[in-house]
Image (cartoon, grey):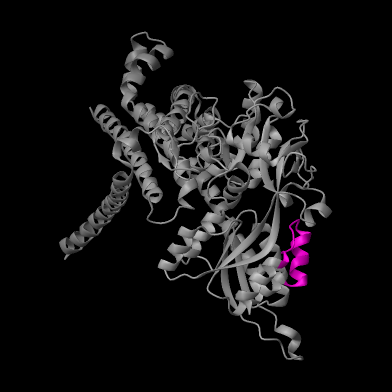
Amino acid sequence: MRKTMYLFVLGLILVAMLTGVGCTRQAAPPAPPANGGNQPAPEMEGGFFEIKGSDSEVNLVQALVEAFAAVNDKAEFSVTGGGSGTGIAALINRQTDIAMSSRPMKPEEIQQAKEKGVEPVPIVFAFDGLAVIVNEKNPVNELTIEQVGKIFSGEITNWKQVGGPDLNISLYGRQSTSGTYVFFRETVVKADYSPAMQMMPGTSQIVEGVRQDASGIGYAAIGYVKNAAGIRTVNLAAKEGDPYISPLDDDKVFGGEYPLTRPLFQYLNGKPQGAIKQLMQFQLSKEGQDIVVKQGFLPVTPHYVQENEKYLK
Amino acid sequence: MRSLKERIIAVFFSLNGITAILILLGIFYLLLSGSFLAWRDIGFFDFLFGRTWNPTGFHSASYGILPLVMSTLMVTAGATVIAVPLGVACAAYLAEVASPWEREIVKPVIEMLAGVPSVVIGFFGLVVLNRLIARTFSLSNGLNALNGAVLLALMALPTIISIAEDALTMVPTEYKEASLALGANRWQTLRLVIFPAAASGVSAAIMLGIGRAIGETMTVIMATGNAIAWPRSMFQSVRTMTATIAIELGEVAYNTTHYYALFAVGFVLFAITFLVNLSADLFLQRSSEVTRR
């Protein structure tokens, strides 16, 4: 009786595996001949490349890579997350071709890369706004950057200190692999995070945590929270007396008035060539930057357009 | 001819056994050599008895493993308190009370519970148990040691039930028959005859269940909040040793103190699980001696 049951389950699993394999085979048809053979095709380089790193960038880069496939279908890219630190470590250990990072590489990381013969080249392909989120039941609507910093360092511990209800604040942040964790600490907190901060393994877990916790506060990329239910974004002011600006106010965010924005990097090993160079040029083209905006991120500023030029000539 | 063949087969199997031992020794060496480098930088006692773990601190790094050990012990102890009575009672029911067809249904279902991926259980903790615990104890959130303990209990249950049930059914029927013939009722028989006879097997089941709970990673990362504050109660967010290694090993720069400190955490974890499994083994050995007699 037991045995037949096991055999039955085993059989089911086998069938599932076989059909699964069949599906993936069907899903990857042989590549169609490019351009129908009439026009001379522009030179397209093929290859298989890994892109790894920042969780804030994963969705955007995935969208860019998918659009790039329409331009160059010979190159294949696999995009995975894990955090900026993970991507950079992988670049240093030559386990990825492109490292996505939402923070600049640290001097010691660059040093390490050089020791291993890796020459990190930064390309800034988009900008990102960071939103501070609270539970939808929380009436606190406006905070200065200084107040947010004090909340996350543990100096302010109760919502009534910033005009809210008498409720102890619970902090939700990312873990230390995250570029957002580092960026937020360097620019907002400017001290150690409070040891009581819950360290969540991903941005969506922060949103989930704050959604369920009336006293919660967290941070996330604006693109992540635009349509999230159960949470609210807080309007931020750079300092006391400045206007409070909503991260959902596209005009002001694009205009550079929103106080929490940062460049998003892709680190390469040496000046890019072949398909990687084409991907970089595509991302920075009008078409690529349109996708960046459509995904809820900000286009590259003129300063970084110039910086990128150095490596893409 | 035949003896040659037999000898080849014997050598082949002993090679297999030796490989497993070599791999274990290799892991042991890897952890220990990394740990020594960490202890050289941090200091052995500062590492073992330091009360703060914050290797990426804004001003300075600190590497005290004590809060991590405390967290792991709290979550594991909580899981044990929940899983042992439930698991042993369930095993006793299956072994002594349940009808054969009940057993045929319940046991495979419980064993299937062991096959639920830990990330799914962790998600359950984050979304369902989080809210439940927060409401029940009127906390602001339920991402704490208790959440982790309940989930780990869930994961340790299949191990405990299935091994304990095996131990109980292995008790010779003569014991039971003799007890019933002397006028004891079924509860007395179970409590005073069968359980003592299977005690070491049941203890082994419990130890193996605990071993599973200590090493679990993904579930606790998702459900316990991972705050680095000193763990004071079951209602506080905790950061276990496994979670620390999994969170930090991904980003750490190679060959730094932080990198080696994670090896040292791994070594402590290895030592704890080794002790737990060793005691399970000793219990199992005693149980097979009892039943052979």
Residue at 63% from the left image edge and 28% from the top image edge: A157
Asked if residue B164 lies left or right of residue A8, the reply is: left
Numbered-mark total? 0
Q: Which residue is the extreme one toward the top?
A: B183
Q: Is residue A93 visible?
A: no
Asked if residue B183 lies left or right of residue B83, the reply is: left
* Nearer to me, A301 or A296: A301
From what the image shows, is residue B157 above or below residue A93? above
Q: Is residue A291 magenta?
A: yes
From what the image shows, is residue A110 above or below residue B78? below
Which quadrant of the rendered structure holds the C terminus of chain A? bottom right
> At which x and y percent is residue A171?
62, 35
> At which x and y percent is residue A215?
68, 29
Q: Which segment did they paint magenta?
A: A285-302
Instruction: Using the rendered view, name the quadrant where residue A98 is placed.
Output: bottom right
> At which x and y percent is residue B11?
21, 59
